[in-house]
Image (tube, helix red, strand yellow):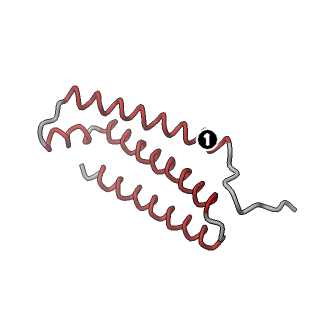
Amino acid sequence: MINRIVVGAGYGLKDWIAQRATAVIMALYTVIIVMAVIIVAPGDFEAWRGIFACGPIKFATFIFFLSLFYHAWIGVRDIWMDYVKPVGVRLTLHVLTLVALVGYVGWIASILWRV
């Protein structure tokens, strides 16, 4: 039987790569949005809405936010695991963080698909 250690992140390389990958996705999205804003030069709400009404931009924006939330989950989870020692408190913080991040995903989806 293998005993699991409940203290410390212990995820190592996989999470390091995931954070770098999500950072690259967010950086690429930023370049795409900056280019779109330079090309379109939106001056009013309808022009901004037009940028985000475009299917590929809408999808890229959703992927950006999924990457952002996953990136945040890894970082915050590691903070809870490294610095919060009581298991019950740490589990509560994990659940609250997950609930918030999943709620944010739903919120951004509802915003994007309203445009």
Q: Residue at the spot x=46%, y=59% of the render?
A: 102
In the image, residue 100 above or below residue 43: below
Secondary structure of the residue carrying numbered label 1: helix
Q: Residue 24 placed where, x, y %?
A: 48, 34
Note whether 63 is above or below 102 in the view shown: above
> Which residue is at the far bottom?
88
Q: Quadrant of residue 2?
A: bottom right
What residue do we see at 30% from left, 49% from top? Answer: 112
Residue in front for this viewpoint, 66 or 19: 19
Of all residues, the one furthest to the right in this rendering is 1
Q: Name the residue located 56 percent from the left edge and 51 percent from the top edge.
A: 74
* 83 on left or right of 112: right
Q: Is residue 78 left or right of residue 99?
A: right
Query: Where is residue 75 drawn, in percent x and y?
Result: 54, 51
Residue at 60 percent across and 68 percent down: it is 91
Front in this rendered view, residue 14 or 107: 14
Q: Residue type at mark 1?
A: Trp
Q: Which residue is mark 1?
A: 16
Q: Could you classify mark 1 by the number of other residues whose Cα lies within 10 Å: few (under 14), some (14-19), or many (20 or more)? A: few
Q: Position of residue 99 (x, y in %)?
A: 48, 65
